[in-house]
Image (cartoon, rainbow, N blue to C red):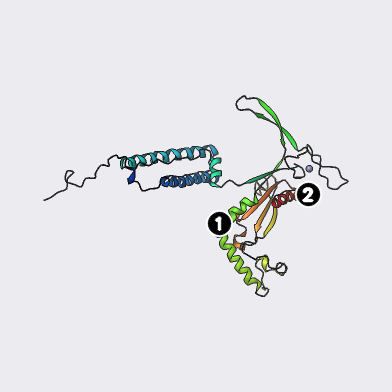
Amino acid sequence: MPGISADTGPQIPEPQPTTDNTQTTLPANAFQEVIDKIRILCMTLGVWLNLHVGISRENSGIFLKAIQVIIAINVNLIFRILRRAGLDIVPPTIDVPTDIRTAYKKTGVEPEIIRIPCCPTCFKPYSLETLPDVCDWKKSPRSWPCGTALKKQVFIQNRKTKKKKSKMVPKCIYATQSFESWLQFFLSRQQIEEHLEKSFQQEQTRRNSPQPNIMCDVQDSPAWRGLGNYLWTRYHLVFAFYIDWFNPFTNKIAGQVASCGAIVMYCLNLPIEVRFLLENIFIVGIIPGAPDVWTITHILIARAIKFRT
Ligand SMILES: [Zn+2]
């Protein structure tokens, strides 16, 4: 009875090393493109761990370094086998950043932040080039100026010489996100395109139908209808401002009493069920404390200046 033994079984031929490059039909950068995609995935995972899971910046760097080592070992092994099989291809470079801040920039997660020097008391915006020593804002032409100091002295140590050098910097900075970069992120999402198209079609139907008895959204109101048709195309976007104050330490009765003001913009083109989702709103800024009407005006002026430019 015939049997299968190690001697009679099918033998896999050992690949012989060769220098004949004509066997290779893959483009030279095929592996590099694949590795670049894997690199983006690794960086996104590192960013997610830092942002969502809450691991520290240092540990995120260790994770990225470990991932780089694992990929490098695997690629090295694969290319050794490929070389033995006669494919003499240049191995791709694996460049996973070990600093999570670099990963933020390369994955496009890092928002573009605009920083404007402002008065710590009245929040009047200034430019860095023409920042005076004290705030010159007046409530009225005959009232006293605000007079709050706008600069402070800081000491910076040189890493090499360890010598300290003093420098005057703005005392207060108003930070806000670039609306243009946020809009780019907003419109790049497939769901937003679909929502804008749906809203556009709904608005056209609404224009040709009588006033509804029940108003479900601001667009159903007679006042809004009186404004005329603003949706000439689906990309004519209309935004509304929303300002409210909240306790950042949550509403504890015996807890710390604090107040922060959030200025938010939301897109009226979106259907109401997705209009106020966190990913669909634009945070104009956070105001510390309980500001009066002047401070809000100054902050909105700073934002309006950026909208114009
Ligand atoms: Zn001031």
Q: Which residue lies under the disc numbered 1?
A: 189
Q: How far apart, in angstroms, are the residues tagged by discs 2 and 1?
A: 37 Å
- Residue type at mark 2: give it: Trp
In this image, 280 relative to 303: left or right?
left
Location of residue 202 in the rendering, given as x and y in whole percent from the top left corner: 61, 69
Q: Which residue lies under the disc numbered 2?
A: 294
In this image, 21 relative to 116: left or right?
left
Tags 2 and 1 touching, CB below 8 Å: no
Mark 1 closeness class: few <14, some 14–19, many ≥20 residues within 10 Å: few
- The picture quadrant where one finds residue 154 is top right
Q: Residue drawn at (56%, 44%), measured in percent from left and top?
A: 105
Mark linked to residue 126 = none
Q: Could you say which is closer to the camera, residue 159 or residue 272? A: 159
Q: Residue drawn at (48%, 47%), measured in percent from left and top?
A: 41
**Ligand 1 rendered quadrant:** top right
In this image, 12 relative to 117: left or right?
left
